[in-house]
Image (tube, rainbow, N blue to C red):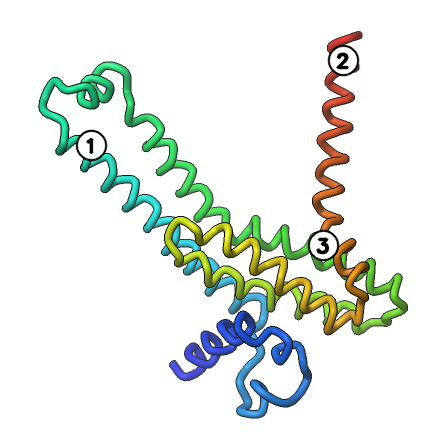
Amino acid sequence: MKAFTDYCQTYVLGLIRPWASHTTAGPPWDDELPRPAVAESLAMSWALAIIQGLSKLLLANLLVQAFLALQEDGGVFHLLVDEYGALLPYYLLVFSTALDLIFYPVLTMVTLEFWNFLIRLFGRFLGMGEERDVAARQITTQALSSNFFLIVPIMGPFLQKFAWLFLMYVGLRERLQASRSLTAVILVTPTVIMMMFFGFAFLGLFYLIKA
């Protein structure tokens, strides 16, 4: 139980004290707190994602029940539900949320591996040796602490994405000793790659249609 508590503590410390979390000594490691590995951070992030998903479904269900309670039998909302399947978006929300929670660990690991590859690539560019592998793992593992914001209603996903970028920024600055401009380049690289991919896909589709 103590180990679980310690991992939860370091998980949160990675969010509120990101600079200290990237040091090899000093607080918070003076008290022999364990550094969370990928497995522990992923498990805690998954638990928070489950809480966020269940909260989203609960809120959606309360809204549906509220509309049904406010409408009399034969009212507009009841008519939409009975005749036109107005609850279809709700069922799609339930289905998509279930898929998100089931495949969350797989999708998160794919995302982490992509970022690890990117960080190692830029680490080699900066002249780092084998330590770039450890640095990449620590940066991305520490950034998983951003998922703590998923428990915040409505604004949670937005805050999580902002915190992820902030923690990645701190990690890149501390572990890779990258400049501000290079750090910004690393952070926008996935977006640029995605835009290029969709751009080439659109051009290919356009070419096939014109042909």
Instruction: Name the quadrant of the C terminus.
Output: top right
Q: Which residue is mark 2?
A: 208
Say whether residue 191 is left or right of residue 152: right
The answer to whether mark 2 and mark 3 are in CB contact below 8 A is: no
Say whether residue 98 is left or right of residue 119: left
Q: Which residue is mark 1?
A: 67
Say whether residue 23 is left or right of residue 60: right
The answer to whether mark 3 and mark 1 are in CB contact below 8 A is: no
Q: Residue at x 66, y 62 (%)?
A: 168
Q: Vertically, is 42 above or below 61?
A: below
Disc 2 to disc 1, how far (Cα)?
A: 47 Å
Q: Which residue is mark 3?
A: 187
- Whichever of labels 2 and 3 marks the residue nearer the N terminus, that label is 3
Of residues 20 and 5, the one nearer the viewer is 20
Disc 2 to disc 3, how far (Cα)?
A: 33 Å
Say whether residue 7 is left or right of residue 90: right
Which amino acid type is shown beneath numbered disc 1? Phe
Determine which of the numbered discs, if any, sits on residue 79 in the image. Answer: none
Instruction: Name the quadrant of the N terminus.
Output: bottom left
Which amino acid type is shown beneath numbered disc 2? Leu
Dot 2 lies on which element? helix
- Whichever of labels 3 and 1 marks the residue nearer the N terminus, that label is 1
Picture coordinates of residue 35, whole percent (x, y): 58, 78
Dot 3 lies on which element? helix
Callout 2: 10 Å neighbours few (<14), some, many (20+)?
few
- Whichever of labels 2 and 1 marks the residue nearer the N terminus, that label is 1
Of residues 185 and 138, the one nearer the viewer is 185
2 vs 3, front mark: 3
Asked where in the image residue 122 lies, by quadrant, the reply is bottom right
Disc 3 to disc 1, how far (Cα)?
A: 43 Å
